[in-house]
Amino acid sequence: MDCRVLSIQSHVVRGYVGNKSATFPLQVLGFEVDSINSVQFSNHTGYEHWKGQVLTADELHVLYEGIRLNKLNHYDYMLTGYTRDVSFLEMVVDIVEELKGTNPSLVYGRYTCLGGHSHCYVPEALLPVYKEKVVPVADIITPNQFEAELLTGRKISTEKDAVEAMDLLHEMGPDTVVITSSDLLSSLGDQYLVALGSQITVKADGTKEKQRIRMDIPRVDAVFVGTGDLFAAMLLAWTHHHPNNLKAACEKTVSVMQHVIKRTITYAKEVAGPDCRPSPAQLELRMVQSKGDIEDPAITVEAVLL
């Protein structure tokens, strides 16, 4: 049976963000993807102008009802991303719960997307919904340091703090937690950022085992849009292929990211010309051009077991 994913994320006509960042890579890795566009914009909001429509909670309900009435609501995975509206987010939770009722083995991956650099991207009213409803039904979450601190109420200043925050997030629901970026100092220098992950797995005898990893990832001096969506999709895919090996799943996820980003920045600099900063259009992810690296990524960053 094919693995089927329901992805409820934003959509842009031009570029890669939300469903555009997630669908193609998942399909390349063999997943059937059904996409519901939470917004449909001309382009992402990093441009000077954008136009489009936002899907309401009622419209989401109507779309899902059509899927349910045709008995098409059996999914192996669900993936969601950026959401600004409380009622829409609550409707997403309702869908997750119903899908898990249909298939108790369904895995729900959530690209957290609350904020970064000490700044919230979403209205404050969404935070309790995330804490009380979204995270408890999620199986995989990918917060950055700021988001992990928001969700746990725990300040992260050391690796020990990060591990404790991931343990708190486990207690809230998810079995797989990856802090995708942090301000922790890397032993390799300030040209690297630190990511950490933790996964709870159940052994054959029924006992639980926890694997924790750390990765030192090269920094890139550019702003990309859609990388968080790509990371969440790739982590979902590679944890499917390596269900009890977070180290391998994260190495392949981060390596895909590195290949795509490197190809993108090389292209952007060539098009922009010497001494010119690339534009948002030039920095759109080179996704199709990276198909081979998505399918079989050469490992560029190795994870260390903690």
Image (spheres, rainbow, N blue to C red):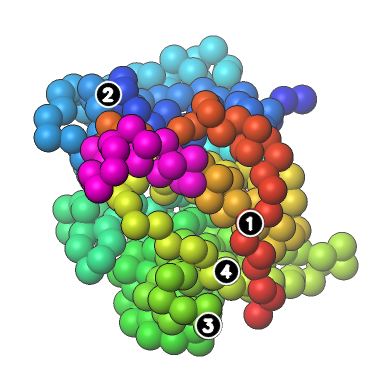
Residue 298 visible in the current orientation = yes
Q: Amino acid at mark 3?
A: Ser
The answer to whether the residues at label 1 and label 3 have Cβ atoms under 8 Å apart is no
Select label 3 or label 4 by which is in front: 3
- For the point 49% across and 32% down, which residue is it? 287
Kindly report the secondary structure that dominates the magenta region of the rendered protein: helix
Can you give x and y, in whole percent of width and height, for residue 228 in the image?
41, 48
Q: Amino acid at mark 4?
A: Met
Q: Can you tell which quarter of the image residue 270 is in?
A: top left
Q: Report the front residue among 243 and 287.
A: 287
Q: List the single residue furthest toward the right.
A: 205
Residue position for label 4: 215
Q: Can you tell which quarter of the image residue 271 is in?
A: top left
Residue position for label 2: 40
- For the point 20% across and 63% down, which residue is it? 119
- For the point 40% across and 57% down, which residue is it? 220
Q: Is residue 128 above or below residue 164?
A: above
Select label 2 or label 4 by which is in front: 4
Position of 3 with respect to 234 (left or right) is right
Residue position for label 3: 187
Q: Pointer 2: residues within 10 angstroms few (<14), some, or many (20+)?
A: some
Q: Which residues are magenta?
A: 261-279
Q: Earlier in the sequence, mark 1 or mark 2?
A: 2
As measured in the structure, the alpha-carbon distance from the residue carrying label 1 to the one carrying label 2 is 34 Å
Q: Earlier in the sequence, mark 2 or mark 3?
A: 2
The secondary structure type at the circle numbered 3 is: loop
The secondary structure type at the circle numbered 4 is: strand
Q: Earlier in the sequence, mark 1 or mark 4?
A: 4
Q: Earlier in the sequence, mark 2 or mark 4?
A: 2
Position of 136 with respect to 290 (left or right) is left
Residue position for label 1: 300
